Image (spheres, rainbow, N blue to C red):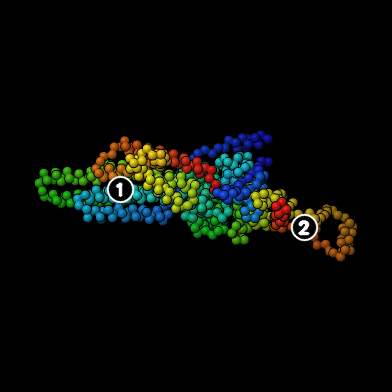
Amino acid sequence: MMDAIRTEQLTKKYDLGWRKGKLLALEKLNLRVREGEVYGLLGPNGSGKSTTLKLVLDLVVPTEGSAWIFDVPCSQVESRLHVGFLPENPYFYRYLTGTETLDFYGRLCGIKSAPRKKRIDELLDLVGLGHARDRRLSGYSKGMLQRIGLAQALIHDPKLLLLDEPTAGVDPIGSKDIRDLIVRLRAMGKTVLLSSHLLAQVQDVCDRIGVLNRGQMILEGDVRALISDQRRLTITVQDLPEAARARVEEAVRAAGASILAVGHPQTTLEALFLDALRKDERGAGEHD
Amino acid sequence: MTETITAESSRRRERVGFSLQRVSVVAANTLTEAVRQKVIILFLLIGLVFIVLAVVLAQFTFGEQMKFIKDTSLGVISVITTLIAIVGTAQLLPSEVENRTIYTILAKPVRRFEFLLGKFCGGLLLVLLGMALMCVLFAAVLWVKEQGMIRELSQTYLGESPAAHLEAQQQIQQVQTEVWDVELVKALVAVLTQAALIASVTLLVSTFSTSLVFNVVVPLMVFIVGMLRGGAADMWGTHRLFMAVVAVIPDFGLFNIADEINLGKVVPWAHIGQIVAYGLGRTLVIVVAAHLLFARREI
């Protein structure tokens, strides 16, 4: 299967100005987002998440390395044919209505009039803004702006969605709506790369995650595998004879304990994330 | 396997060429946004008020009322159009970056040059719209004045001999020729070309600066230096610094043909053609330079 996003040794240094040197925002990032998966990019502020998204979208130029979207170099405009992007705290033209906003982006993508109109209706229903379609965006709440942002990202039915903090500043209900929408998009076969601080949310929707800290990928892998606590052991058995089970339970009871459940105990993604950061900081301290 | 190869090859075939349609979408949206700028509305109101005021003040002039109205109105249209071109264009790129609306646009298959050209064309449409409004009022003012003068002449010669009537007809024709002078059109063409040129200079500055004040002040200075360039040639014609200024700063003095027209001179269309060619040629070069700067700008 083709990678939706691939980066090789992707590095970005920002010039801070005369005599102030350079800021290393991203260092030799090798990222692969597979087609059809939901990939969560995690990290504290300034860790390089937004820089990664900007590099992939060619909004900033890499200092070193390269990036591809569906095998097309990101420096080419063709790489964005199948990409939808929702920036963090999106701003739109406040004098346009919801319908006009989607119409603007639809025309930018070259969608013909009749299918565009149909697509706008579909998307407004999908994001639950059908009732506010003729209202100017200046009268939209933050959650509504986030939803119209998602709709504009989806206007040309892209195969890949880049979502930068999609639930930032959105109330819990709106946040759940967006999470549900991401799950639906995955079911529709879309690839999603999202950056977020809301770890529980990432845990719920992502197949794989990558943790960035100070521009480096410090942890990456399958969410379920990463959050499994390997120090404990859960034995899942099938067709265990009653006698054997009785002996196990007897042994447990003999130790003064009772059996409540059988399964893999899991840590939380939040704990994993913070632990990874702590280890990285400690490692950096030792190097210094 | 075959399916995979087909999908691969179709993906390779996808090309995004330059699209005038995308440019027009950005331009139309830019115009919609620009007409909402309070400062632009203020400039326009000032321009419209001054054109009306010219008629009132013309009452206090001796004899040459029509000349005064035309001089003043042309001057007002030139100044206001130039200001709209500078201030309107100065905000186009910085506001997109500041409001982050540029992210969602450039994340679509839109070339940066299409975006830049769309913004520039939107700015030019704004200039054209503003100028058209002032010209409509100017024409209305001229028409009212013409009708007043014709009425006055008709009343003066009412009941007079046929010979006097003939003379009245000649005078009316003279008034009409004076009012609807084709030289005015030439002056307005020069003003519009000048506005396009100064707008391109402003666009160029705004590709590397996010400060609105800087984006207004620098083009304004370029404009002033460009206006004075012609006069300074006699004194500094061979000086290296002057030669450098000539190479970089357009000669805005060329577009000021209103003075010649006010003196009653006839400006040949060939000269207007040269001015327009110079202005549009320079505009093109500056827009290309703006594109080169904007193409790799980090957003």
Vertical side of A87 occupied by B110: above or below: above
Q: Residue at x 37, y 44 (%)?
A: B226
Q: Residue at x 46, y 46 (%)?
A: B205
Residue assigned mark 2: A265
- The picture places residue B14, in percent across and down from the top left corner, at 57, 37
Farthest residue, direction left: B161
Residue in the image at 26% along x and 45% along y: B262
Tag 2: amino acid: Pro
Tell whether label 1 touches label 2 (CB within 8 Å).
no
Amino acid type at mark 1? Leu
- B224 to the left or right of A28: left
- Chain that bears disc 1: B
Label disc, if present, on residue B74 of the rendered structure: 1
Look at the image and tell me whether residue A67 can be seen: no
Q: Is residue B90 left or right of residue A237?
A: left
Q: Is residue B7 left or right of residue B218?
A: right
Q: Residues within 10 Å of mark 1 (few under 14, many from 20)?
A: many
Q: Position of residue B124 (x, y in %)?
A: 41, 46
Tag 2, which secondary structure? loop
Chain letter behind tag 2: A
* 2 and 1 marks on the same chain: no
What is the distance, in whole Å, between disc 2 and disc 1 at their CAs?
83 Å
Give the x, y percent position of residue A103: 50, 49
Front residue (pair B250, B261): B250
Quadrant position of residue A203: bottom right
Residue at image x 84%, y 64%?
A257
- Asked whether residue B35 appears in the rendered view, the answer is yes
Tell me where residue B126 appears, x and y as whole percent: 40, 48
